[in-house]
Amino acid sequence: MSAPLSLRALNRATLARQHLLARTTADAVTVVHDVAGLQAQLARPPFVGLWTRIAGFTREGLTAPVHGRRLVRATAMRGTLHVMTAADYLALRAPLATMLAAGAAGVLGARSDGFDADRLLAEAREILHARGPLPFDALRDALAARWPDADVRAMGYTVRMHLPLVQVPTDGAPWAWDGKAPFTPADTWLGASCATDAGPAALVRRYLAAFGPATPADAQAWSGLKGLRATFDAMRDALVTLRDDRGRELFDLPDAPRPGEDADAPVRLLPEFDNLVLAHHDRTRIVADAQRPRIVSKNLQVAATFLVDGMVAGTWTVATARGTATLTLHPFAALAPRARRALEAEGEALVRFVEPEARAHAVVVATGD
């Protein structure tokens, strides 16, 4: 049996798969596939997530494949918006459907009593096919006209969770989609239907490739699916089993990179909602338990973070005032001089990427946070 994997070795294995040990020269479509999607509750974070992973990344590197329909923004893991490759979305929407339906039922409860869900979904598709892509509030208004006594927000949430919809990019928007970007059926936008025969094993393989080695509980935390222990057990012959230094059984793909704990991990700045800090039930390989409340708020907002030696060591923000865009680093503890210099250099490059129109740019390290 192989030696147990230390927390640091798990950290390096995940960072390697996330292109965070070294920037890659691969294109955005390849990287989005490699990292199993980028959470996109907000429009800007996927751009920052790719900037920190791809050498020489520009906004066009993401906007072009989005407009070219090779990448899509759609509801996926955990019922949240993600940027995914079109191929992955079509392949993985089926195993996610059970989670999305259960999530909708759990959130809505009796609020869905005022409408028949199957009929509602059919009418939503009819509206979108007849009128073309619609912002979600316009789709809700159209449904409310047909179901005047039903809870309009419950109808909208049901449609969002049950129908495979993608968000159409906005011409000229700085981050590909503006706040009113419309939705349209995925099969209309992509010219292909979601696969119906994919099971949870396909999702597990994509997860391990991007975030392993991991436990079934980790995969459930990332995907939102429940009951994945049986799927992992059924896949044992196709996976390798490992142990961490606490004795926990971990699963992985046989040929996945596990570079070892001595691999260098340069400083990196991650966007809000980056899946690196969300994709495990036990997140201690990336962020200490004591620091989790500092990056995930009570209303589930996830801060932009930075890594030092592979671990979350603080958060960052950008604000523009009087023509100067300032990126402020908020470290959890005093930074070593070398790490501080590296973070300031990364921050200087990132603030120019995020706010190219500013007359001046600055990086500040906050004290007393």
Image: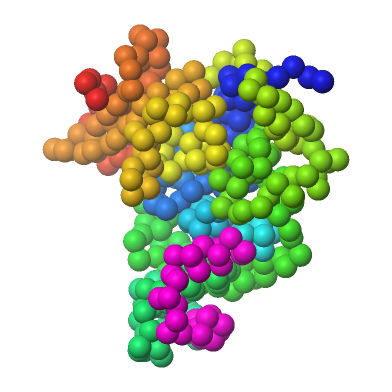
The residue positioned 73% from the left and 35% from the top of the image is 252
State the quadrant of the C terminus: top left
In the current view of this chain or complex, which residue is farthest to the top? 337
In the current view of this chain or complex, which residue is farthest to the left? 322
Q: Is residue 16 left or right of residue 54?
A: right
The answer to whether one can see residue 315 in this image is yes
Q: Is residue 147 left or right of residue 358?
A: right
Q: Is residue 81 above or below residue 152?
A: above
Q: Is residue 169 above or below residue 352?
A: below
State the quadrant of the N terminus: top right
The answer to whether one can see residue 125 in this image is no
Residue 104 is one of the magenta-drawn residues: yes
The residue positioned 52% from the left and 33% from the top of the image is 283
Question: How far from the left and from the top, in percent, is residue 127?
Answer: 48, 84
Color theme of the render: rainbow
Residue range highlighted in magenta: 97-124
Q: Is residue 124 above or below residue 169?
A: below
Question: How far from the left and from the top, in percent, is residue 101?
Answer: 56, 67
The quarter of the displayed image where residue 330 is located? top left
Q: How many marks?
A: 0
Instruction: Looking at the picture, tell me which residue is in the foreground, 295 or 36.
Output: 295
Residue 328 is one of the magenta-drawn residues: no
Q: Is residue 53 above or below residue 159?
A: above
Question: How far from the left and from the top, in percent, is residue 295?
Answer: 37, 36
The residue positioned 59% from the left and 74% from the top of the image is 188
Question: How far from the left and from the top, in percent, is residue 235?
Answer: 80, 45
Q: Is residue 348 left or right of residue 88?
A: left
Magenta highlight: main SS:
helix
Instruction: Looking at the picture, tell me which residue is in the foreground, 338 or 335.
Output: 335
